[in-house]
Image (tube, rainbow, N blue to C red):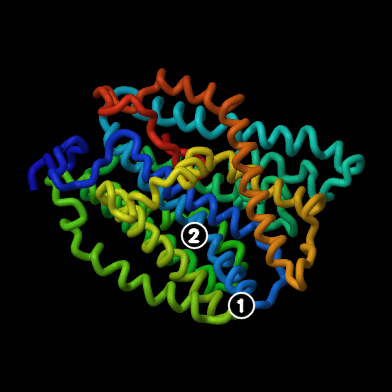
């Protein structure tokens, strides 16, 4: 194979999906991801009717929204790095843009959580778990490891374990991508996926806690690597795209029975074993297929229209702040106007649960809008000083943000 096989700027085939500039449909994917997570955390009904049980069943899958965020982050970040590879200030510009996108809001949340709220716990009847315990771990983006040996999680910062995983990925991945050829990058992704599965299997056989296989970085990096693998496959230097990798066609078919088992098995030892070992990877594979289908979808198709609708695009654009605020907002609602257990209306709490969804989703979006306009966007303007590419961008629109941590 010629040396062109390692070139990141080789021309793609004419039929390949557009991968440059801002792709609004990926905002829609991000919107779906954050709404899944909000749905998961704001379900509190006790109704045992068919509608109630169906709601709980659907809400139970909401945790996979984090895996969709991971896949999307791996896809976007790897594409950005591969196209910037070999250019001046490759590392400086990448890390500067990550800092401007992620740090301001994250450390503002930490400041409120550790410097303001602990002194107000008694006066405002706040959750007693609001303390300064573990502050250093959160400051260093290591909260996912801190969760392994603490009995309780911080009621405001309990969701940031996934941001810690992404940040750790952002620190290491640019160096790995810079060091390998195209073939090496493909092998890197496959090796990372295999490693994550092996570590989870090993921990499960060893009898480690369920929490460890859920929040430890090496156990969850497979979804990030799956997104990275798709990004690289679509940038095949000879324009072949995923057709250059026949095994990518049957991988989803292997994932389907694993996901089906997770859905069908009652919650218990068998369910947990399947989920902890191959389940997370299987979910990641199916979400990788979703990202591919959305990126490749032509305008006017049902899939493109669905992920281009205004609601998903809006929630996707502001997903980072929504992800950070929705959990504490849920806690406030459960202590105040929409207290849990939810009130019964006509013998069921299902109507109040629907109201809870609307209020929680709407207030989360409203707070995120305030955060964006008064805080975040002013830092994002500084990213113009750190362009990813020396080549002029195809469009002036800003690149999309990744997962809750934003890949722009």
- Residue 184 seen: no
Label disc, if present, on residue 50 of the rendered structure: 1
Furthest residue in direction top, as rendered: 385
Residue 284 position by quadrant: bottom left
In the image, taking residue 301 as reference, residue 317 lies left or right, namely right
| Image coordinates for residue 401, horizontal then vertical, percent | 44, 38
- Mark on residue 219? 2
x, y (%) of residue 215? 57, 57
In the image, residue 137 sits, relative to residue 293, either above or below, namely: above
- Left or right: residue 178 versus residue 6 is right
> SS at mark 2?
helix
Residue 245 visible at all: yes
Q: 133 left or right of 310? A: right
Cα separation, mark 2 vs mark 1, equals: 36 Å
x 46%, y 26%: residue: 96
Q: Earlier in the sequence, mark 2 or mark 1?
A: 1
**Which residue appears at 58% of the width and 39% of the height?**
321
- Locate the C terminus and report the quarter of the image it occupies: top left
**In this view of the protein, which residue sits in the foreground, 111 or 305?**
305
> Which residue lies most toward the right here?
123
For residue 117, which quarter of the picture? top right
Residue 156 in the figure: left or right of residue 178: right
Relative image position of residue 386 (x, y in whole percent): 39, 22
Mark 1 is surrounded, within 10 Å at the Cα level, by few (under 14), some (14 to 19) or many (20 or more) other residues, namely few
Q: Residue at x 33, y 24 (%)?
A: 396
Name the quadrant containing residue 78. top left
Front-most of residues 309 and 104:
309
Alpha-carbon neighbours of circle 2 within 10 Å: few (<14), some, or many (≥20)? many
Circles 2 and 1, Cβ within 8 Å, touching? The answer is: no
Foreground residue among 198 and 382: 382
Q: Is residue 302 above or below residue 235?
A: below
């Amino acid at each position: 194979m010629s040396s062109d096989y390692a070139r990141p700027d080789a021309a793609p085939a004419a039929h390949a999906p557009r991968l440059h500039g801002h792709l609004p449909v990926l905002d829609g994917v991000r919107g779906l991801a954050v709404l899944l997570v909000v749905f998961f955390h704001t379900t509190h009904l006790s109704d045992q009717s068919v509608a109630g049980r169906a709601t709980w069943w659907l809400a139970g899958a909401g945790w996979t929204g984090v895996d969709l965020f991971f896949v999307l982050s791996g896809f976007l970040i790897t594409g950005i790095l591969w196209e910037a590879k070999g250019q001046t200030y490759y590392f400086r510009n990448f890390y500067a843009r990550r800092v401007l996108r992620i740090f301001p809001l994250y450390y503002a949340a930490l400041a409120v959580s550790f410097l303001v709220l602990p002194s107000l716990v008694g006066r405002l009847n706040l959750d007693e778990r609001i303390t300064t315990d573990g502050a250093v771990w959160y400051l260093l983006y290591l909260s996912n490891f801190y969760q392994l040996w603490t009995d309780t999680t911080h009621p405001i910062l309990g969701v940031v374990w996934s941001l810690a995983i992404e940040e750790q990925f952002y620190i290491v991945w640019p160096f790995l991508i810079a060091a390998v050829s195209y073939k090496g990058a493909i092998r890197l992704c496959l090796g990372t996926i295999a490693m994550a599965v092996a570590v989870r299997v090993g921990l499960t056989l060893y009898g480690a806690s369920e929490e460890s296989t859920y929040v430890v970085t090496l156990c969850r990096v497979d979804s990030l690597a799956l997104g990275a693998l798709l990004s690289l496959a679509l940038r095949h230097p000879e324009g072949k795209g995923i057709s250059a990798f026949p095994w990518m066609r049957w991988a989803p078919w292997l994932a389907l029975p694993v996901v089906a088992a997770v859905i069908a098995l009652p919650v218990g030892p068998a369910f947990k074993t399947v989920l902890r070992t191959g389940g997370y990877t299987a979910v990641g594979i199916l979400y990788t297929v979703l990202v591919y289908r959305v990126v490749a979808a032509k305008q006017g198709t049902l899939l493109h229209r669905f992920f281009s609708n205004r609601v998903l695009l809006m929630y996707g654009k502001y997903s980072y702040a929504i992800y950070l605020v929705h959990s504490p907002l849920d806690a406030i609602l459960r202590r105040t106007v929409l207290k849990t257990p939810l009130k019964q209306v006509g013998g069921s709490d299902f109507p109040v649960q629907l109201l809870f969804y609307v209020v929680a989703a709407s207030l989360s979006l409203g707070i995120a809008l305030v955060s964006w306009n008064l805080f975040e966007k002013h830092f994002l303007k500084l990213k113009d000083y750190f362009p990813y590419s020396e080549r002029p961008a195809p469009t002036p629109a800003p690149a999309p943000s990744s997962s809750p941590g934003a890949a722009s």
